[in-house]
Image (cartoon, helix red, strand yellow):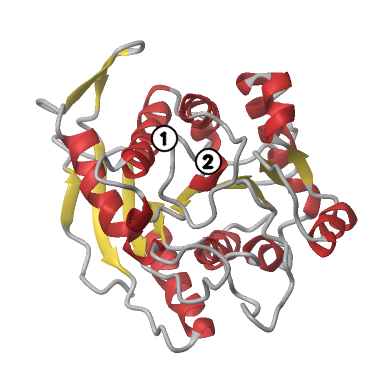
Amino acid sequence: MAANPPGRYLLEPRLSPQQRYAFIGVPHDAATSLGNPGARFGPQALRRALQDVLGGPLHDGRLAHLERGILDLSRVEVVDWGDVALSYHDTERTVQETYQAVDKALAAGFSPLVAGGDHGVTYPCVKALHDRDPGAIGLIQLDAHSDLLDDSERQGRYSGSSGMRRALELEGLAGPNLVQIGLRGHTSVEQYEAGQRLGVRRISAARLAEMGVAAAARQALAWAGAGTGAIYLTIDLDVVTPGEAPGTGWPEPGGLTGGQLLDLVAVVAPHIAALDVVELNPVFDGPARTTAILAARLVTEFITSRLQNPGKKGGSKGGDYGV
């Protein structure tokens, strides 16, 4: 359950809301032992940046996009559900506590906007969507790393390196419906072979550059949506090249640009049922808050793209996205 009851608006609707979002903070990085600690401060940093980016230019429920024109947000509601009250001494309990908070938001008719925290927070959020959806689900992961570690003495089973491995243990998430975008560099043989064995789809950062953002986004939707009823989107900010997003747990050279990531999110957003943005680490972000501002722009792009193109908010039994 959230530490504070829902009620404080990050975006207050002026008319009866047609789109409702629950901003849920998961300030957890207790299992982080390989990268930079500090992602537990991410939810608060994203709240502040979102108020600046989304609320600052908003006037009479309207917002202007310099390419898409005037956007009417008068029927959009974003409620701050507070941070999940976590049991930091027990990682498995934090998984259950996060699950309960996201499940409660889904049950109340809200689309979750989850702010991490390290990437381990994704698994309980995906599980909540999985358990609420009667059929199969898809998962699109924007990340420099595959996060397919099974277990380790140092990190356990629920770390930021294991989130996708745990998610693939869910009955309704098949390997071919997990699409990993932005991977690059080196990884362990175990994680690479696990992805191959489970049939996980991959679009590396280099491959995305060859395909172009729009084609890569449509391909990801086709793979994640094939035979599924809902798609979850997780964004690890280390998917972006470190020069544009230094405030992350493990910066990896050679990533996507911020512009590419924003464009990709705009394409997939109308088909997404729930979102998280993780590994925002303000300890390493610097005074300009570059990474926090990017994270807030991503959330704003997600909301406004769904507003202009309502889509299905889910998967496609027929895989009709095309490439």
Circle 1 crowding by C-alpha within 10 Å: few under 14, some 14–19, many from 20: many
Name the residue beneath numbered marker 1: 302
- Please tell me in which quadrant of the rendered image residue 190 appears: bottom right
> Three-letter amino acid code at disc 1?
Phe
Name the residue beneath numbered marker 2: 272
Instruction: Name the residue located 48 percent from the left edge and 88 percent from the top edge.
Output: 90
Quadrant in which the C terminus appears: top right
Q: Is residue 174 above or below residue 317?
A: below
Horizontally, residue 148 falls left or right of residue 260, namely right
Can I make out residue 236 in this image?
no
Tell which of 110 and 162 is nearer to you: 162
Q: Is residue 214 above or below residue 1?
A: above
Q: Position of residue 263 (x, y in %)?
A: 50, 24
Tell which of 293 and 244 is nearer to you: 244
Q: Which mark is residue 193?
A: none
User: Which SS class for mark 2?
Assistant: loop
Judged from this view, the residue extending furthest toward the left is 60
Instruction: Name the residue located 47 percent from the left edge and 63 percent from the top edge.
Output: 36
> Three-letter amino acid code at disc 2?
Ile
Instruction: Name the residue located 69 percent from the left edge and 27 percent from the top edge.
Output: 208
Horizontally, residue 298 falls left or right of residue 12, namely right
Circle 2 crowding by C-alpha within 10 Å: few under 14, some 14–19, many from 20: many
